[in-house]
Amino acid sequence: MVRQELVARQLDERIAARYAVGQRLRVLDVGPGLGIQALRLARAGHQVTCLESDPAVLAALWEALWAEPEGVRERVRLVEGDVRDTGAHFPPGAFDVVLCHGVLMYVTEPAPTLAGLARVLAPGGLLSLLVRNAEALAMRPGLAGDWDTALAAFDVTEYTNRLGLRVRADRLADLTATLTGVGVPLDTWYGVRLFTDQAADHEAVPGPERLARLLDAEDRAGRTDPYRAVAALLHLCAVRRV
């Protein structure tokens, strides 16, 4: 919940900085998961395409979509396909905004994937990436007192996520260089989930007043050095060269 709320705030901020109020955008959400950001943007009036390779996730997305009003459903298109083949599914410059949240960690080599995302992004368009922060892999085990795992995390970019899968983290400097190389240089970046990264998956959401303060603190940390550099996730917003 913290992750989705913070990313929504940051994404809305970057969209407002680049586009006119009320402008209807063409959005691609690659690996949309439960569709939280995709449906939120569709409710705001944007045309949203979701690219997803997992049939089970697609089925869940269809179910969530049919719970929405007809006007929202009409603005969402679901496409079955792999993120690594994004450039083959859509024509060049087809989208004003491309979201790729929590996906690069499952891709062995990010550069070809990012090149494909850049290809379908219109000139001046916004690319939003959410990645695991390789510079902060020692934080979670260290704060939990798991010293062996913390020490090992300083020298690797792979880790075991909460689903028990071996996945990959990214370094900000590496992604910045790659984005520049594919013609979508980094514009702004944020840290996501710093103070709450130790929270258990089953932990109850706080009451409204405490939750509001929590989110404000996380939001401030995600925009402030040195805190944002050790957040669990990095939200990178890059802009396609005109």
Image: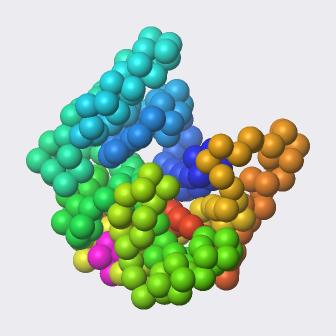
Q: Residue at x 25, y 77 (%)?
A: 181
Dividing the picture into quadrants, the one containing residue 224 is: bottom right
Q: In which quadrant of the rendered image does the N terminus lie?
A: top right
Magenta-highlighted stretch: main secondary structure?
Answer: helix
Q: Residue at x 39, y 82 (%)?
A: 156
Judge from the rendering whether residue 212 lies leftward or rightward of residue 126; answer left or right: right
Taking 56 as reference, is 29 above or below it?
below
The residues colored magenta run 175-180
Q: In which quadrant of the rendered image does the C terminus lie?
A: bottom left
Judge from the rendering whether residue 241 lies leftward or rightward of residue 85; answer left or right: right
Dividing the picture into quadrants, the one containing residue 112 is: bottom left
Q: Residue at x 15, y 51 (%)?
A: 85
Colouring chosen for the image of the structure = rainbow
**Is residue 241 shown to the viewer in this render?**
no
Rendered location of residue 98, percent (x, y): 36, 50
How many numbered callouts?
A: 0
As for residue 177 lying within the magenta part, the answer is yes
**Is residue 193 shown to the viewer in this render?**
yes
